[in-house]
Amino acid sequence: MTDEIIESHGLTKEDFEHICSILGRKPNYTELGIFSVMWSEHCSYKSSKPHLKNFPTSAKWVIQGPGENAGIIDIGDGLAAVFKIESHNHPSFIEPYQGAATGVGGILRDIFTMGARPVANLNSLRFGNVNNPRTRYIIEEVVAGIAGYGNCMGIPTVGGEVYFDECYDSNPLVNAFTLGVAKKDNIFYGVAKGVDNPVIYIGSRTGRDGIHGATMASEEFDEGSEERRPTVQVGDPFTEKLLLEACLELMEKKCILGIQDMGAAGLTCSTAEMASRAGTGIEIELNKVPLREEKMTPYEIMLSESQERMLLVTEKGREKEVLEILKKWDLEAAVIGRVTDSRRFVVKNNDSVVADIPVKSLTDDIPIPERPIKKPDWIDELRCKETDYTIESEDVNEIFEKILLSPDIVSREWIYDQYDHMVGINTVELPGSDAAVIRLEGSKKGLALSLDGNGRYCFLNPYEGGKKAVAESARNISCSGALPLAITNCLNFGNPERPDVMWQFSETVKGMAEACKKLETPVVSGNVSFYNETIGKGVYPTPVIGMVGILEDVAVRCNQAFKNEGDIIVLLGESGKEMGGSLFQKVILGKVEGKIPICNLDEEMRLQKSIRELISLRIVNSAHDISDGGLAIAIAEMSFSSKEGLGAEIEIKDNLPLASILFGESPSRIIATCKKENLDKLNEFLKKSNIKASIIGKVIPDFLRIKITNDNTSSLIEKRVFEIEKKWKGGFKKLVAR
């Protein structure tokens, strides 16, 4: 085995020597490939594992935390919510349509593998400079891929987020989230249990697509990366739909003892992980694996990442029953092996053993590299920069419009119009609000879902940025009236071999963990995506938080839309002057620097508890968290959501700088509205809750008027709702389709 072959598999000389000591001999080529994918960053989490231990993962409502195909929480009435987020970043740059489509397919399989019927998809997308034609091509293809797969599956895409920055030019981020609902007493796990029980392969035939996809996702890109199209899988949502229904029928008939999808590292990972979790061994015969192409080698079969494939274990003697059900669904299936008590991973091809490896050496006993951690030299200087945020009164209308029509704020209607967000008829809060809300069939309960992340904040201060990401996601859930219960996260970072990247990662995780503990939202599943870097240029540290909350009565929910002319507009929470990392700073000044606003988690808890109670008491009738673009943008979004042409008349007197009042992004703030007759109840409640609040205006027809008085100077934003909303709604299409 040459050094070049070892290196091409992403292994070091030390790794190879360790493999030799495990086996007591040199590995053959197939075994080398198996170790390569199982020890890859993508499958093993070897760089992140020591840090992920900081996350809280348990609570009385948590049924399954990290370590399985997806996380599970108890939502009452004998039901469980099953959810997870996954990245498909590298494939989506190389082949955007298939990369995004198979990302959706993969996360769907993770959910129905657990016995849950998927009921909602969300996605978090990061793209480069929208003025770059390549970026616009990637946007169109990624959105089409997500829509094409999700729509064919009949699962609504109910929300998400999209952001732009040059750091994502060569490394777009495509994070896919799916939530499913299962019966609490009918959950399935990825275990190969019961010695001599048969191992059954089901779904699409195995081809050469996706070979070494996991390894590709564990290294940074170079100039030749676009030539790697063969490593991107090809999806078939129609086969996946059959697979979904067949698996759920097998589960309903108690035919399954253990099940796992063949995702990253394909047949290798699914067999090894199922045996490892059960503490058993597994033996498979490659000549029984259904193949799509001729003359495939054992190496290719084991490492293929062809889509729409599952592996299940059933009781010995029930093979015929299982195969008949699969035949009814027109799915290919074959008994390819059996569970053993050897605790070894054995692969045969025409009676010849082509791999014989201790199971735990592939899943647990992985060499953990000691990644150096070093705070970058430039960070303190960048944070200490004193930016001049002074704006003139006569410029506020122009600045407001420039931020409102910037790529990070314009309406995403062009995107979600391509998604079917109503299929299944359980979507009760449409895309565009703080959180998506879905009805639980046969129950008055609902689930609220949100996705949030902000790379700029984590770039300037990863610890505080991590805190803010979790807090904002929870705030979005609370603004719907739901109680946040748990999170899944996708941690998108650069090259972990760089000490500054590992510092960003460790600090972000610490900040997230602190917020999760304080807000009582344990982490139940997730994904780490390293090596989002091209020729040494990495993405911002970008944690994406997927949060799930429970609404006891879906009829008592809230959204961000203004409801009635004359309603009182109230600002809950306290504004600060810090503008570092804000959208104003990026769009107007072209900078990302300075001190970011700090999130006080005690204040955040009080605020969220209060808004949930105010919604349940029906005192407030709309609520919207203040985030990207600040107060002025939040007011505009509430207006545009009203569908009635309702606007606002706002008047604020404050000594803060004008830019901070209008466009500052201080956390722990919500804009709420209430009817005039409920104002006394609102004031009384807020006084008892120790929440700082101020009446800032009222809902009016047709116009947005925001008057700010500070330092004896008045500034006025004045826009006709119809005119500015039309620009905002058409803004995204105008950016992309040119």
Image (tube, helix red, strand yellow):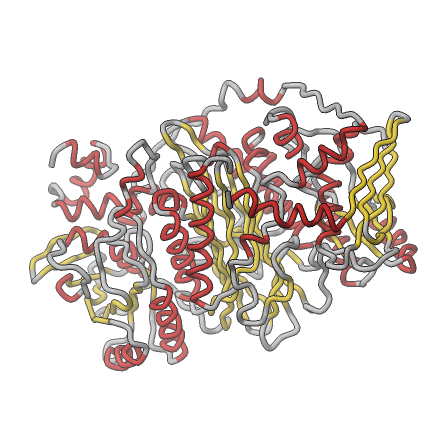
Q: Is residue 616 above or below residue 605?
A: below
**Nearer the observer, 387 or 638:** 638
Query: What is the x, y in percent for residue 701?
Result: 83, 54
The answer to which of 391 and 82 lies nearer the viewer is: 391
Tell me where residue 171 sits by quadrant: top left
- Tally the marks: 0
Residue 637 on image: x %, y %: 71, 49
In-image side of 192 versus 713 (left or right): left
The answer to which of 534 and 251 lies nearer the viewer is: 534
Residue 272, compared with residue 654, is above or below; it is below
Residue 634 is left or right of residue 369, and the answer is right
**Above-or-below relation of 701 to 574:** below
At a point 23% along the width and 51% down the height, the residue shown is 303
The residue under the point 32% across, 77% down is 329
Q: Residue at x 55, y 73 (%)?
A: 78
Residue at the front extreme?
Answer: 738
Residue 406 is left or right of residue 315, and the answer is right
Q: The N terminus is located in which quarter?
A: top left
Residue drawn where x is 70% and y is 38% of the image: 401
Percent coordinates x, y for residue 618 in the rendering: 80, 63
Q: Is residue 113 left or right of residue 339?
A: right
- Residue 424's x, y, as percent? 54, 71
Name the image quarter holding residue 158.
bottom right
